[in-house]
Each structure stands twice: as C-alpha cells, then as structure tokens.
Image (tube, rainbow, N blue to C red):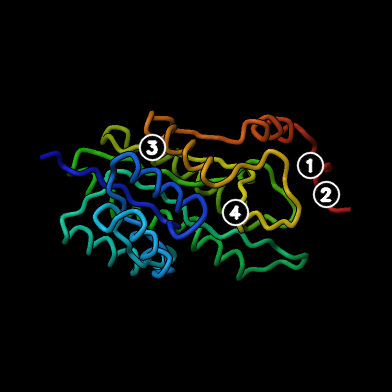
Amino acid sequence: MAIPKYCLVTGASSGIGKHIACEMVGRGWKVIAIARRGDELNNLAKSLGQDKLIPKVCDVSDFDSVKNTSKELIASNIFPSLFYLNAGDGDEEEENFNLELHRRTFETNYFGVINWIDQWVPVLKKNGGGTFVGTSSFQSFIALPGSAAYGSSKAALNYTFESLDAMHYKNNIRFALIYPGPVDTPMLKTDKPIPSAWKPEKAAKYIVKKVLKGHMKIKFPPRWVLLLGIGKRLPRSFFRVK
C-alpha cells in the first residue's frame, strides 16, 4: 500500500488557499486544511471527502495555536512534506501612521508563516526534507501609498525565505515564493474590475503546477509581471500622493 502524501494549506477556508486545497486533493494528496473558520473547513471536507481533507481550526498568528496543531498532527502520525503558507492580511493604511496595523499585519503575514517553519523544520530534517511555499506579493517590490504594513511584511518574508533556502538546501528543505499580482478575492479591495486579474481557481492551478515542477519563484499574471518590471524602473516621485 502506498504511503499517503500529505500537504498543509493555511488560509484554506476561502480564496487561493481553498482552491489550492481542492487542486491538491484532485492530484491525490491528503490535505491538512488550516483556517480560523471551522464551519467553512468542515463544508470543504464534506465536499472533497473526509478521508482526503483534514480540517484544523488554527490561528496562524498565534504561536501556541500553531504549536498545538502541529503536535496534534505529529501525534496522529501525519507528516506533511509540502506546506502552502498562504494565510494573509491585507488591510490598507490611512494617512495617519497606524502602529497597531503594522503589528497585526506582521503577526499574520510574517510570523503566521515562520511559526510553521519553527515547528516543522526539525521534523523535515529527520524525514528527509520537504518544501515550504510562502505567499508574497508584487507589493514587496514596489512601495505603494497605503501599503507600508502589507508590503514590508511581504518583503521581510522574501528575505527570510531566500536566506532559509540557502541555509537548508543541504537538508533537502526548500523555500519557494509566490508573487501574485491582482487576484479576484476579497483582499483585492476594489469595486472596479482590474484588467487581467486572475480568478483564484486559475491562480491555484498555476501555483500547484509550478510548485510540483520544482519552481522556486512563481509570478503571475503575465501582463502584471511585465508591468512590475516597468514599475520597478519608475522614479519614486511617480508614486507620491498628490
């Protein structure tokens, strides 16, 4: 009998995370689905199959919650080798600086990722390796007005993943980064359609395909990748609020 392949997906109750979970189940993996909304996770488990998706209510920004969930999985002899660390917070900043927003955003977008790394790197070392996939953003490359908290949390994630990948390559532990442009989820926070924005289903399929092929830096949609290249060359004055 084949040993089941387990992956863990945070932010699995909606958006890209939910569709990554669906895509991985469709590819024969068993998925540990992580989110704060237990009802949404249970509905997803019913639709995909209770034997294929394991719902776990967990607040990724709470270290003890991540630690306890990890202990439960290990005690149940469940050892994911692939981690889609997708949960995120994207609230925009007002004109007045908001320290609490920065703390909250980093607790979710940065520490909500490395909390899992802290718990699972020692396990992966013993088990022969694995892959962490962190969700960054185009905004980690270009500083936009109102995105100081969000963009800097993603930029910190970029640096950490690249550093950890260099450090743990010898242990067969890899750290891949996803750089999404506009994806049509509630985090987009706009009433107007954005040209060339992807649906979360399309984004999830693209991410999974690239990750399973071993890609370490995944950027999309293509038109926005081109615009990102142009934007990085513009002077800072171009982005100033008039």
Residue at which label 2 appears: 240
Identify residue type, mark 2: Arg
The quadrant of the rendering that contains the N terminus is top left
Tell me, for residue 236, which label it has, or none.
1
Identify residue type, mark 3: Asp
Which of the two discs, 3 and 1, labels the residue nearer the N terminus?
3
Q: In which quarter of the image is residue 34?
A: bottom left
Identify residue type, mark 1: Arg
Q: Residue at point 63% right, 41% down? A: 141
- Determine the CA span between mark 3 and mark 1: 31 Å
- Determine the CA span between mark 1 and mark 4: 28 Å
Outermost residue on the left side: it is 1
Where residue 33 sits: x, y (%)? 36, 57
Where residue 161 sits: x, y (%)? 44, 42
**Secondary structure category for the residue under label 4:** loop
Identify residue type, mark 4: Thr
CA neighbours of label 2 inside 10 A, class few (<14), some (14 to 19), many (20+): few
Residue at which label 4 appears: 185
Residue at which label 3 appears: 165
- Determine the CA span between mark 3 and mark 2: 35 Å
CA neighbours of label 1 inside 10 A, class few (<14), some (14 to 19), many (20+): few
